C-alpha cells in the first residue's frame, strides 16, 4: 500500500499547525477510550502519540489489539503511544523512540512520567503548566551521558521531582530543586534546554518516527516551531 490512510493522534506533543500535510494523513486529537474502535474501519494505519489520562478513560489495550487483528498497523511513541507499544509488542504493536525504549527497560515506569498539564490557545499554541518527567530525564542524559542515573546528584534530583504529582512538576519548581541539588553549570543547561523544542524528547521521538514513515527529514520542524512556553 503506497499511501495508507493514517490516523495520527497528536495534541500536547506537537502543534499541529506546524505539521506537514502528508498524503492520506489525518491529525486527530489525543486518543481516548473507544477512539480506535470508532476509527478502525476508516484507517489502514494508526500512529498513537498522545492520549487522554485524567479527563476521560485512556485508550484500551483491547481496542488496539482489535485493530491489529483485523489487519491494521498500529505504532506508538512519545507518550501513551510508547506505553501501549511496550505493553502490546507481543500482539504486534510497533514502538519507536527513546521514550519507548526506556519504558521497555523500566527506566520510565508509568503514565505520570510522560504526562503534563497543558492547554491549547485559540491559535493552536500549546501552553504547558508542567514538565513531563521523561523530558527531564532525557535532558539530564544529554548533559551527563547515558549513565546519568549513576550520578548521585542527578539520581537524587530525579527522585525529588518524581515525588511530586505530574501536574505539580512545574518549570519553576524544577529549577528551584535543581538550584539546591545540582551544579550551577548543569542548572544553566537544564534551564536552557527545557525551553527549547529540539530538547523535547517526546517531540523528537514523534518527528523522527513520522519522518521515517514518509521517508522525509522532518527534523527542521523542531527548529521552526515555537519554543516551549510555560505558564
Image (cartoon, rainbow, N blue to C red):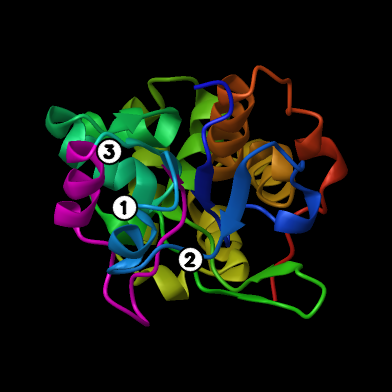
Q: Is residue 212 left or right of residue 78?
A: right
* Residue 86 falls within the magenta-colored stretch: no
Residue 68 seen in render: yes
Instruction: Give how far across and how far down residue 147 sits, in percent.
Output: 38, 21
The magenta segment: 47-70
Q: Are marks 1 and 2 in contact (CB under 8 Å)?
A: no
At horizontal 60% and vertical 35% (from top left) the residue drawn is 204
Q: Secondary structure at mark 3?
A: helix
Q: Are marks 2 and 3 in contact (CB under 8 Å)?
A: no
Mark 2 highlights which residue?
116
Which of discs 1 and 3 lies nearer the camera? The answer is 3
Give the Cα distance between marks 2 and 3: 20 Å
Q: Is residue 172 left or right of residue 220?
A: left
Tag on residue 172? none
Mark 1 highlights which residue?
159
Number of other residues with Cα within 10 Å of mark 1, as a class: few under 14, some 14 to 19, many 20 or more: few
Q: Are marks 1 and 3 in contact (CB under 8 Å)?
A: no
In terms of sequence position, does the residue under pointer 1 or pointer 2 come before the other?
2
Q: Nearer the viewer, residue 12 or 161?
A: 12
At horizontal 19% and vertical 31% (from top left) the residue drawn is 89
In terms of sequence position, does the residue under pointer 2 or pointer 3 come before the other?
3
Tag on residue 85? 3
* Residue 66 falls within the magenta-colored stretch: yes
Give the Cα distance between marks 1 and 2: 17 Å
Instruction: Give how far across and how far down residue 80 sits, in percent.
Output: 35, 52
Amino acid at each position: 500500500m503506497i499511501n495508507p490512510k493514517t490516523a495520527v493522534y497528536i495534541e500536547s506533543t506537537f502543534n499541529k499547525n506546524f505539521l506537514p500535510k502528508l498524503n492520506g494523513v489525518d491529525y486527530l486529537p489525543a486518543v481516548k477510550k473507544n477512539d480506535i474502535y470508532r476509527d478502525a474501519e476508516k484507517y489502514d494505519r494508526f500512529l498513537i502519540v498522545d492520549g487522554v489520562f485524567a479527563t476521560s478513560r485512556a485508550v484500551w489495550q483491547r481496542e488496539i489489539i482489535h485493530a491489529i487483528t483485523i489487519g491494521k498497523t498500529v505504532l506508538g511513541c512519545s507518550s501513551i503511544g510508547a506505553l501501549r507499544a511496550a505493553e502490546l509488542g507481543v500482539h504486534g504493536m510497533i514502538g519507536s523512540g527513546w521514550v519507548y525504549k526506556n519504558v521497555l527497560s523500566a527506566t520510565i515506569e508509568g503514565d505520570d512520567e510522560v504526562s503534563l498539564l497543558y492547554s491549547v490557545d485559540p491559535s493552536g499554541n500549546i501552553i504547558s503548566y508542567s514538565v513531563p518527567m521523561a523530558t527531564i530525564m532525557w535532558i539530564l542524559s544529554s548533559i551527563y551521558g547515558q549513565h546519568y542515573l549513576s550520578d548521585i546528584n542527578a539520581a537524587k534530583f530525579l527522585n525529588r521531582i518524581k515525588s511530586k504529582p505530574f501536574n505539580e512538576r512545574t518549570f519553576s519548581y524544577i529549577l528551584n530543586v535543581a538550584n539546591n541539588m545540582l551544579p550551577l553549570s548543569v542548572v544553566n543547561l537544564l534551564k536552557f534546554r527545557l525551553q527549547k523544542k529540539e530538547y523535547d524528547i517526546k517531540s523528537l521521538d514523534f518527528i523522527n518516527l513520522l519522518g521515517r514513515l514518509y521517508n522525509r527529514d522532518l527534523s527542521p520542524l523542531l527548529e521552526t516551531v515555537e519554543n516551549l512556553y510555560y505558564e
